[in-house]
């Protein structure tokens, strides 16, 4: 009987080290012919066989690994054994021999490894799923969506975080919504967040189906409350508002919201460096709807801003926080809290009971739009003043900013507000 000896290609440990070092130093790996002593430059990425299917691979970035190639069921399979130099030549040969024994017995190590990885994924907790969702999905969403989803991801983590993702059922989602006991709209956001989170889980094959499927919020909380309509303050109400007994900074903030028709967050985060008083322009860096825009400043708006400048001290913000704890939290300077203007309005209405309907800072935008329309300003221009996109196909192709038209419209609106601000005889 003749013993058949398997031939190797002659890889050795020293040679592998030289190849890896060469690539790490941005040099080409080489090999020397033992008989002719001729040096050959090897291409990168590099793949060199050690025999019997064991292959050493080296990428251009310097990542080296061991691959075992074999046939199973008539098809070529590949199994990654490990990275070099963590797994040296001798250890790689030993593991390769063990895997070949499995193959000779009818096994398929590559398939076994995939199943093991799959089982590991099935052991994910909801907490780990949330971390993965934050990293891969949430980070690319808009700021307002990140805020809403982020708030509800914390609720989901606090209640379901320790559960295995594969164990979460529709009843767990229902119990979560009932436990949080939030108002209807906030519960809707919670359900939407859970639905998107477990959609991510389904995409990763951690669950066969989304456990949020089929859950109807109306069945849990009853019919959705009527959507609150935006109101338009009348001229009489605006006159009362202009004489409101509020902190002067809050009075000026309300006037600026009316005069510029911006969103309260845009005003709250505004910094003095964004304002060009010589050109009467405010350059908003970014908005809820996307790219920033330039807002023309009417004469009364400039005057209100200059008054704020004397009140803001050395802060970078036009509406700086007056709370020492908040300023310390943000490194010594910070804008007012997101709820400050709304709270000031609510306190004034509750305490002083003026003859005015309850309103929110956002209602000042609808008030500005409605009054500008009443002053004869066209619909499209008022929409642009509010930084709304034009509807339909026009909004897609019309990239004109209407700056001069907006300047004229806001000047007309500013003059109207200035008349209301004057003491009534």
Image: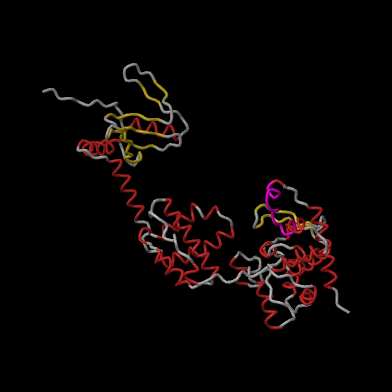
Residue 281's quadrant in the figure?
A: bottom right
Taking the spot 17% from the left edge, 25% from the top edge, the residue there is: 4
Taking the spot 25% from the left edge, 38% from the top edge, the residue there is: 99
Instruction: From the viewer's side, name the closer residue of 222 and 86.
Output: 222
- Furthest residue to the top? 36
From the top left corner, tell me how far across and down residue 132 is, in percent.
45, 54
From the top left corner, tell me how far across and down residue 161 is, in percent.
41, 64
Residue 350's quadrant in the figure?
A: bottom right
Side of 84 relative to 391 (left or right):
left
Instruction: From the viewer's side, name the closer residue of 66 and 146.
Output: 146
Asked if the stretch drawn in magenta spans residue 303, the answer is no
Report the span colored magenta. 384-396
From the top left corner, tell me how far across and down residue 354 is, in percent.
74, 81
Q: Let me know if residue 93 appears in the view.
A: yes
Residue 13's quadrant in the figure?
A: top left
- Furthest residue to the left? 1
**Location of the C terminus (image quadrant):** bottom right
- Figure check: 173 above or below 2: below
From the top left corner, tell me how far across and down residue 136 is, in percent.
49, 52
Side of 73 relative to 371 (left or right):
left
**Location of the N terminus (image quadrant):** top left
Instruction: From the viewer's side, name the closer residue of 48 and 268.
Output: 268
Q: Let me know if residue 276 appears in the view.
A: no
């Amino acid at each position: 009987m003749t013993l058949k000896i398997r031939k190797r290609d002659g890889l050795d440990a020293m040679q592998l080290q030289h190849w890896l070092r060469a690539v790490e130093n941005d040099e080409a790996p080489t090999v020397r012919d033992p008989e002719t002593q001729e040096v050959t430059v090897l291409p990168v990425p590099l793949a060199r066989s050690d025999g019997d299917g064991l292959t050493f691979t080296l990428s251009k970035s310097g990542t080296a690994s061991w691959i075992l190639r074999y046939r199973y069921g008539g098809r070529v399979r590949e199994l990654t054994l490990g990275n070099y130099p963590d797994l040296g030549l001798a250890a790689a040969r030993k593991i390769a021999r063990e895997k070949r024994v499995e193959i000779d017995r009818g096994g398929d190590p590559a398939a076994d490894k995939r199943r093991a990885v799959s089982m590991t994924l099935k052991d994910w907790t909801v907490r780990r799923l949330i971390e993965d969702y934050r990293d891969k999905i949430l980070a690319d969403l808009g700021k307002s969506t990140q805020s809403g989803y982020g708030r509800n991801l914390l609720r989901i983590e606090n209640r379901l975080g320790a559960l295995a993702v594969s164990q979460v059922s529709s009843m767990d989602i229902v119990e979560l919504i009932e436990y949080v006991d939030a108002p209807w709209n906030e519960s809707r956001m919670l359900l939407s967040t859970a639905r998107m989170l477990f959609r991510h889980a389904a995409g990763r094959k951690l669950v066969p189906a989304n456990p949020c499927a089929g859950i109807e919020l109306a069945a849990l909380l009853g019919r959705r409350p009527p959507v609150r309509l935006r109101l338009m303050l009348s001229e009489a109400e605006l006159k009362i508002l202009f004489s409101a007994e509020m902190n002067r900074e809050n009075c000026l903030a309300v006037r600026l919201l009316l005069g510029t028709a911006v969103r309260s967050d845009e005003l709250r985060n505004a910094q003095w460096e964004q304002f060009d008083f010589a050109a009467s322009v405010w350059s908003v860096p970014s908005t809820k709807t996307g790219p920033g825009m330039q807002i023309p400043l009417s004469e009364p708006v400039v005057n209100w801003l200059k008054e704020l400048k004397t009140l803001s001290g050395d802060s970078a913000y036009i509406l700086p926080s007056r709370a020492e704890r908040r300023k310390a939290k943000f490194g010594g300077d910070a804008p007012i809290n997101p709820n400050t203007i709304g709270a000031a309005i609510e306190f004034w209405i509750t305490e002083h009971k003026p003859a005015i309907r309850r309103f929110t800072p956002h209602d000042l935008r609808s008030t500005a739009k409605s009054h500008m329309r009443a002053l004869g300003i066209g619909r499209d221009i008022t929409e642009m003043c509010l930084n709304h996109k034009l509807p339909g196909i026009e909004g897609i192709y019309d990239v004109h900013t209407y700056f001069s038209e907006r300047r004229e419209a806001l000047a007309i609106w500013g003059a109207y507000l200035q008349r209301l601000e004057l003491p009534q005889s």
